[in-house]
Image (cartoon, rainbow, N blue to C red):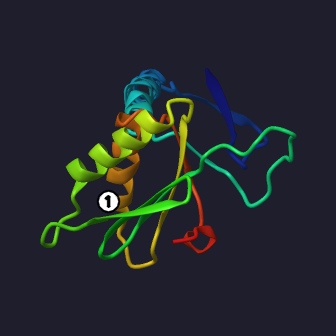
Amino acid sequence: MSISVDGGKRGGKKSLTAELNLVPYIDLLTCMVAFLLITAVWTQLSQLNVKDKGTGGEETGDPPMAKIELLVGAEGFHLSVAGEAQIVPKKGDDYDFPALLASLKKAKQGHPDKDDVQIAAEDSVLFDPLAQAMDTAISAGFPLVSLTDSGAMRF
């Protein structure tokens, strides 16, 4: 590649030859592509699939199915299965996830056709117990986890 520079004097142009080395730029781009491909895998491993049920639903002629709702509160879990409320209290300062798993498995045995559970949290609850409650519901046999507003639940 060559470049011409106007010298300004005597009306002539000086010839200036310069080489542009593209190898470092190609190396940089190759490293960036490799980095992005490697880190793209980690975004899929830490993903929870949830969906928003919303407030409205489609009206059908079928009888209503049992509704399973879980509220993560400051004092423990409030589980409602087909209108029957159950409280899973905390053990000391920690949430009792094994007891919640047992209650959700019992609910799954009582309603084997149900695949969904609605989960909400009080405002004072941190994200970690909410995420662990979602994982517990999925491991109990409810793969369709949906997040709802805690004000919409009736306990």
Amino acid type at image mark 1? Asp
Image x and y of residue 87, in percent: 34, 65
Is the N terminus in the top left, top right, bottom left or bottom right quadrant? Answer: top right
Image x and y of residue 141, in percent: 42, 33
Image x and y of residue 63, in percent: 76, 42
Q: Quick check: 89 left or right of 108?
A: left
Image x and y of residue 123, in percent: 45, 77
Q: Quick check: 9 left or right of 117?
A: right
* Residue 128 drawn above or below residue 57: below
Residue visible at 49% across and 34% down in the picture: 143
* Residue 33 drawn above or below residue 110: above
Mark 1 nearby-residue class (10 Å; few <14, some 14–19, many ≥20): few
Q: Nearer the viewer, residue 42 or 87?
A: 87
* Residue 150 drawn above or below residue 61: below
Residue 43 shows in this picture? no
Q: Nearer the viewer, residue 55 or 31?
A: 55
Q: Quick check: 42 left or right of 59?
A: left
Q: Quick check: 94 left or right of 16?
A: left
Residue visible at 53% across and 28% down in the picture: 18
Residue 13 shows in this picture? yes
Residue visible at 58% across and 68% down in the picture: 153
* Residue 108 drawn above or below residue 78: above
Which image quadrant for residue 34? top left
Residue visible at 48% across and 24% down in the picture: 22
Element class at badge 1: helix
Which residue occupies the extreme bottom position in the image? Answer: 124
Q: Nearer the viewer, residue 70 or 110?
A: 110
Q: Nearer the viewer, residue 3 or 59?
A: 59
Q: List the residue tagged with mark 1.
A: 128
Which image quadrant for residue 124? bottom left
Which residue occupies the extreme left position in the image? Answer: 92
